[in-house]
Amino acid sequence: MQTISLNGKWLLTQKGKRGHINALVPGCVHTDLLAAKKIENPFFGDNEQNLQWIGTTDWVYKCTFNISDNILVKDRVLLCCHGVDTLATIFLNGKCIGKTDNMFRTWEFDIKPALKKGKNTIEIRFDSTFLLGKKHEMKKHLRVWDVNSTKFYLWISKIRKEIRKEQCNYGWDWGPTLITCGIWRDIEIIAFDGARLTDVHIMQDHSRRGTVVLNVAVTAEVVHNFTLKARVLLVYNNKIEAEETGDFINQKANASFIVENPKLWWPNGMGGQPLYQLRIELQDKDNNVLDTQFRRIGLRTLHLERKKDKWGESFQFSVNGVPFFAKGANW
């Protein structure tokens, strides 16, 4: 597998306007405008009110990158967007390759047909979520609980429940109303032959005292039908604690092993926080490694205990069988 990072310098344009400013990816439109000295600090004084136009405007991010023959000959070439905020239409060399409508998930698009050798141009056009919310409100009115005195903030309250976007963007009691957009997490091109790992799911079984059973379910994307296996290694302090291999059937494989005398993870103040590392290798029949993923895990149980008592029913958490008082709020 080969990856090409598209992080770094991009160009940012307000839709319908001429000229551009430099943008930094990952980032957002507000930080880019602030870095270019196009706006005042939104956290100072009442500047927040004067910057609401940013969230009602459409924006365009653009950059160029180079592609060589060794990428174009790969079986699959994908654009992987780990975080796009939020309503975006993505163009590669003028061809629309996909759209997004959820800030919180990863998006992947097949871009091999649109790529060319040498210089390529990617453009991501962001539509205002404010305007989308107004369209939904015109179709169906929904009451709101946090009605503000101004018509603008009344619309804001209606928008937030219509879209998969960070809710505090639309204001909260502890923060300002700043409706962002942009590429807020890594963006990269992934190219591979044959197969790649797509998902790793880890389950812990603490039912036997003094041991932990780890069950690891692995999923792969397979381009060609050939023999594959998953080699899973558990490492602690650079030492291999356990190892297991599972064969892929219908693009899925499982590995399970027992951890003797496990080093348990504890909340702050109750003990240490030892972390194990899982190394998952996708291998062909000749043990060639096609792809690798890593996970860090703490071995522990966490239960909500609800037992009858003289007041009615308890509501407390226990970790590794030890009850504790959960402190903090909004955490």
Image: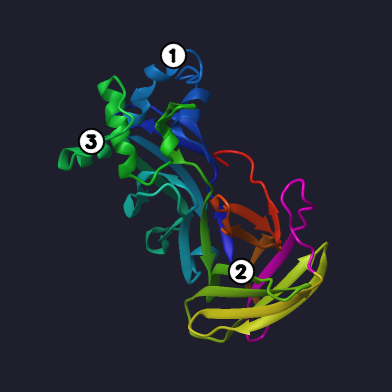
Q: Which residue is mark 3?
A: 134
- Residue 143 occupies which quadrant of the picture? top left
Q: CA distance from mark 1 to mark 3?
A: 25 Å
For disc 2, the neighbor class at 10 Å (few under 14, some 14 to 19, many from 20) is: some
Residue type, label 3:
Lys
**Which residue, as the protein is rendered here, is positioned at the far top?**
45
At x 74%, y 58%, the residue is 265
Instruction: Give the foreground label among 2 and 3.
Output: 2
In contact (CB < 8 Å): disc 1 and disc 3? no
**Residue at which label 2 appears:** 202
Kind of element beneath mark 3 = helix
Q: Residue 296 in the image: state x and y as whole percent.
A: 68, 60
Name the amino acid type tagged 1: Asp
Left or right of residue 272, residue 23 in this image: left
Amino acid of disc 2: Ile
Query: Would residue 26 be visible to someone looking at this image?
Result: yes
**Colour scheme employed for the rendering of this structure:** rainbow
Q: Is residue 50 left or right of residue 219?
A: left
Helix, strand or loop: magenta stretch? loop
